[in-house]
Amino acid sequence: MQLKDFYTVNNVAIAENLATANITINKDHEIFKGHFPGNPVTPGVCMMQIIKELTEDVVGKKLRMQSSSNIKFMAIINPEKTPDLVLKLDISETEEGYKVKNSTSFGDTVALKLTSNFIEK
Protein backbone atom coordinates (compact mmCIF):
# COMPACT_ATOMS: atom_id res chain seq x y z
CA MET A 1 0.00 0.00 0.00
CA GLN A 2 1.67 3.16 -1.17
CA LEU A 3 -0.78 5.35 0.75
CA LYS A 4 0.29 4.15 4.19
CA ASP A 5 -2.36 4.90 6.83
CA PHE A 6 -4.27 7.12 4.37
CA TYR A 7 -7.36 4.94 4.33
CA THR A 8 -8.85 1.80 5.82
CA VAL A 9 -10.72 -0.82 3.83
CA ASN A 10 -13.80 -1.71 5.87
CA ASN A 11 -15.05 -4.38 3.49
CA VAL A 12 -15.05 -5.47 -0.14
CA ALA A 13 -17.86 -7.38 -1.84
CA ILE A 14 -17.26 -9.00 -5.22
CA ALA A 15 -20.03 -10.18 -7.52
CA GLU A 16 -18.82 -11.31 -10.95
CA ASN A 17 -16.86 -8.34 -12.35
CA LEU A 18 -18.22 -5.73 -9.90
CA ALA A 19 -16.32 -4.99 -6.69
CA THR A 20 -17.81 -2.68 -4.08
CA ALA A 21 -15.44 -1.39 -1.41
CA ASN A 22 -16.30 0.61 1.69
CA ILE A 23 -13.36 2.65 2.91
CA THR A 24 -12.67 5.34 5.50
CA ILE A 25 -10.23 8.17 4.82
CA ASN A 26 -7.91 9.00 7.75
CA LYS A 27 -8.65 12.67 8.48
CA ASP A 28 -5.46 12.90 10.58
CA HIS A 29 -3.13 11.80 7.77
CA GLU A 30 -0.06 13.99 7.16
CA ILE A 31 -1.18 14.88 3.61
CA PHE A 32 -4.08 17.00 4.91
CA LYS A 33 -1.69 19.34 6.73
CA GLY A 34 -0.77 20.73 3.32
CA HIS A 35 -3.91 19.96 1.32
CA PHE A 36 -5.38 22.22 2.72
CA PRO A 37 -4.88 23.47 6.30
CA GLY A 38 -8.23 24.22 7.92
CA ASN A 39 -10.15 22.91 4.90
CA PRO A 40 -8.90 19.40 4.08
CA VAL A 41 -9.57 18.08 0.59
CA THR A 42 -8.73 14.55 -0.50
CA PRO A 43 -6.34 14.85 -3.47
CA GLY A 44 -7.63 13.39 -6.73
CA VAL A 45 -4.35 11.59 -7.32
CA CYS A 46 -4.80 9.80 -3.97
CA MET A 47 -8.27 8.66 -5.03
CA MET A 48 -6.79 7.31 -8.26
CA GLN A 49 -4.14 5.44 -6.24
CA ILE A 50 -6.83 3.93 -4.00
CA ILE A 51 -8.67 2.68 -7.10
CA LYS A 52 -5.45 1.08 -8.36
CA GLU A 53 -4.72 -0.57 -5.01
CA LEU A 54 -8.26 -1.93 -4.67
CA THR A 55 -8.12 -3.28 -8.22
CA GLU A 56 -4.81 -5.00 -7.42
CA ASP A 57 -6.40 -6.65 -4.38
CA VAL A 58 -9.38 -7.87 -6.43
CA VAL A 59 -7.37 -9.30 -9.36
CA GLY A 60 -4.43 -10.48 -7.22
CA LYS A 61 -1.77 -8.83 -9.38
CA LYS A 62 0.51 -5.79 -9.18
CA LEU A 63 -0.64 -3.23 -11.73
CA ARG A 64 0.46 0.00 -13.35
CA MET A 65 -1.97 2.56 -14.70
CA GLN A 66 -1.62 2.77 -18.46
CA SER A 67 -4.28 5.39 -19.17
CA SER A 68 -7.36 7.09 -17.74
CA SER A 69 -10.27 8.81 -19.38
CA ASN A 70 -13.58 10.38 -18.48
CA ILE A 71 -12.15 11.59 -15.17
CA LYS A 72 -14.85 13.61 -13.44
CA PHE A 73 -14.34 15.04 -9.97
CA MET A 74 -17.90 15.92 -9.05
CA ALA A 75 -17.73 16.72 -5.32
CA ILE A 76 -15.08 17.57 -2.75
CA ILE A 77 -14.16 14.73 -0.42
CA ASN A 78 -13.51 16.40 2.93
CA PRO A 79 -12.23 13.71 5.33
CA GLU A 80 -13.57 15.59 8.34
CA LYS A 81 -17.12 15.71 6.96
CA THR A 82 -17.36 12.69 4.63
CA PRO A 83 -14.60 10.18 5.45
CA ASP A 84 -16.68 7.10 4.58
CA LEU A 85 -16.69 6.30 0.87
CA VAL A 86 -18.16 3.62 -1.36
CA LEU A 87 -16.12 2.72 -4.44
CA LYS A 88 -17.72 0.65 -7.16
CA LEU A 89 -15.23 -0.94 -9.52
CA ASP A 90 -16.49 -2.56 -12.71
CA ILE A 91 -13.41 -4.61 -13.67
CA SER A 92 -13.06 -6.29 -17.03
CA GLU A 93 -10.05 -8.17 -18.39
CA THR A 94 -8.64 -6.93 -21.68
CA GLU A 95 -5.90 -8.16 -24.01
CA GLU A 96 -3.46 -5.75 -22.36
CA GLY A 97 -4.62 -6.02 -18.73
CA TYR A 98 -7.70 -4.64 -17.01
CA LYS A 99 -10.23 -1.90 -17.67
CA VAL A 100 -11.85 -0.38 -14.58
CA LYS A 101 -14.90 1.85 -14.53
CA ASN A 102 -15.14 3.53 -11.13
CA SER A 103 -17.80 5.45 -9.29
CA THR A 104 -16.94 6.82 -5.84
CA SER A 105 -19.60 8.23 -3.57
CA PHE A 106 -20.47 9.28 -0.04
CA GLY A 107 -24.13 9.08 0.92
CA ASP A 108 -26.17 9.97 -2.15
CA THR A 109 -23.39 12.15 -3.60
CA VAL A 110 -21.19 10.90 -6.43
CA ALA A 111 -17.74 12.39 -5.88
CA LEU A 112 -15.69 10.79 -8.65
CA LYS A 113 -16.15 8.86 -11.87
CA LEU A 114 -13.35 7.58 -14.05
CA THR A 115 -12.28 4.86 -16.41
CA SER A 116 -8.73 3.49 -16.18
CA ASN A 117 -6.70 0.88 -18.01
CA PHE A 118 -4.14 -1.07 -16.03
CA ILE A 119 -1.36 -3.41 -17.12
CA GLU A 120 0.68 -5.84 -15.06
CA LYS A 121 3.94 -4.55 -13.62
Image: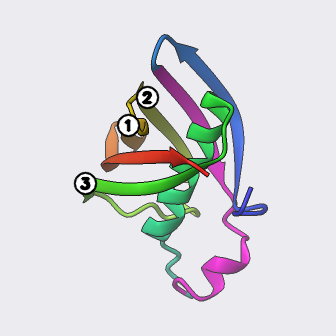
If the image is split into quadrants, where does the N terminus sit?
Answer: bottom right
Left or right: 82 with respect to 29? left
- Label 1: state its secondary structure: strand
Q: Which of marks 3 and 1 is nearer the N terminus?
A: 3
Where does the magenta region start and end?
A: 18-36
Residue sitting at the far right: 5
| Magenta-colored stretch includes residue 32 | yes
Instruction: Identify the residue under disc 2.
Output: 91
Instruction: Identify the residue under disc 3.
Output: 69
Examine the rendering and report whether any part of residue 108 can be seen. yes
Write the residue at 72% across / 79% down.
30
Image height of 92 relative to 56, above or below: above
Q: Nearer the viewer, residue 107 or 5?
A: 5
Query: Which amino acid type corresponds to the residue marked 2 in the rendered image?
Result: Ile
Image coordinates of residue 59 in percent, x first then y, are 61, 29
Image coordinates of residue 19 in percent, x first then y, are 51, 25
Write the residue at 52% across / 85% down.
36
Could you tell me how far apart the alpha carbons at marks 3 and 1 are, in whole angstroms? 11 Å
Write the residue at 32% across / 55% down.
68
Query: Which amino acid type corresponds to the residue marked 1 in the rendered image?
Result: Lys
Could you tell me how far apart the alpha carbons at marks 3 and 2 are, in whole angstroms? 15 Å
- Label 3: state its secondary structure: strand
Instruction: Identify the residue under disc 1.
Output: 99
Give the label on residue 9, or none. none
Could you tell me how far apart the alpha carbons at marks 2 and 1 are, in whole angstroms? 6 Å
Image coordinates of residue 84 in percent, x first then y, are 57, 45
Left or right: 26 with respect to 92? right
Residue sitting at the far front: 95
What is the quadrant of residue 94 in the picture? top left
Disc 2 + disc 1, Cβ < 8 Å: yes
Write the residue at 53% across / 76% down.
40
Q: Earlier in the sequence, mark 3 or mark 2?
A: 3
